[in-house]
Amino acid sequence: MLEEIGVPFDNIQLSLDDQEHKTPEYLAINPMGRMPALVHHGTVVTETAAIVTYLAETFPDSHLSVPPGTPERGEFLRWLFFAPVTAEPSVMWVALGKVETETDYLPFANINDVADKIEPAITGKAYLVDERFTAADLMLGATYSGGRNCCQFCLSDLKSNAIGVLCLQGQPGKPINLL
């Protein structure tokens, strides 16, 4: 996201193996010890969707947000948060090999149901919202890419490859870098 908005930033990598995310210094930034976290001019933002929303709105020249009060705003927010709240848990469930559970209830949607909702949203369109690349496209593409790249998630696991199509298209003339 920071590359997309084109601002300089320091990318500080923490070692999970060395438990650097559990140090007092990092816990002062994010008491949950989770990543990512953003510190911008003294403002701390955690949770991926919150960070993406904050950046898209703080840097309006990036055109990655849809302004409040516009008809497309609701659809933008829907897809922006659909990625981490609905799609990501489903993608990770499949990516991790559909770990068995003792309950019939899962706190997230079936991956094929997720794909079935995404497919009509992008069929015949280049982007999810407002006929342009937004943070919602970035979030959904990153969700798919994270599952595919980190956990050997495969397109053949889906009835639809809608998530993969979205992930691979990026902006015209500017390939998306999701790694």
Image: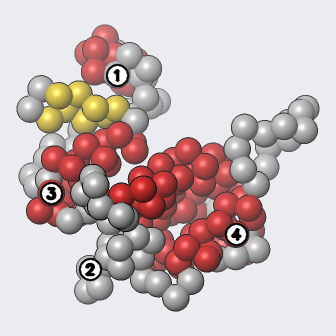
Residue at the spot 15% in from the left edge and 57% down from the top edge: 60
User: Contact (CB < 8 A) between labels 3 and 4?
Assistant: no
Where does the image place residue 40, in percent across and percent down from the top left?
14, 35
Residue in the picture at 89% in, 33% down: 103
Residue 105 at x, y percent in the picture: 84, 37
Amino acid at circle 4 = Asp
The residue under the point 44% across, 20% down is: 32
Q: Which mark is residue 116?
A: 4
Instruction: Report which residue position mark 1 lands on.
Output: 30
Mark with earlier residue (2, 3): 3
Dividing the picture into quadrants, the one containing residue 136 is: bottom left
Q: Which structural element holds mark 4?
A: helix
Q: Which residue is mark 3?
A: 60
Give the residue furthest to the top. Answer: 24
Residue 166, horizontal then vertical, whole percent:
49, 74
Q: Residue 174: which numbered mark, if any?
A: 2
What residue type is disc 2 on? Lys
Judge by depth and name the residue closer to the eye, 15 or 49.
49
Residue drawn where x is 23% and y is 28% of the image = 44
Say which of marks 1 and 3 sits in front: 3
Asked if labels 1 and 2 touch by Cβ distance under 8 angstroms, the answer is no
Does label 4 or label 1 sit earlier along the sequence?
A: 1
Q: Amino acid at mark 1?
A: Asn
Residue 150 in view (yes/no)? no
Q: Nearer the viewer, residue 38 or 65?
A: 65
**Disc 3 marks which amino acid?**
Pro
Above/below status of 176 relative to 51: below
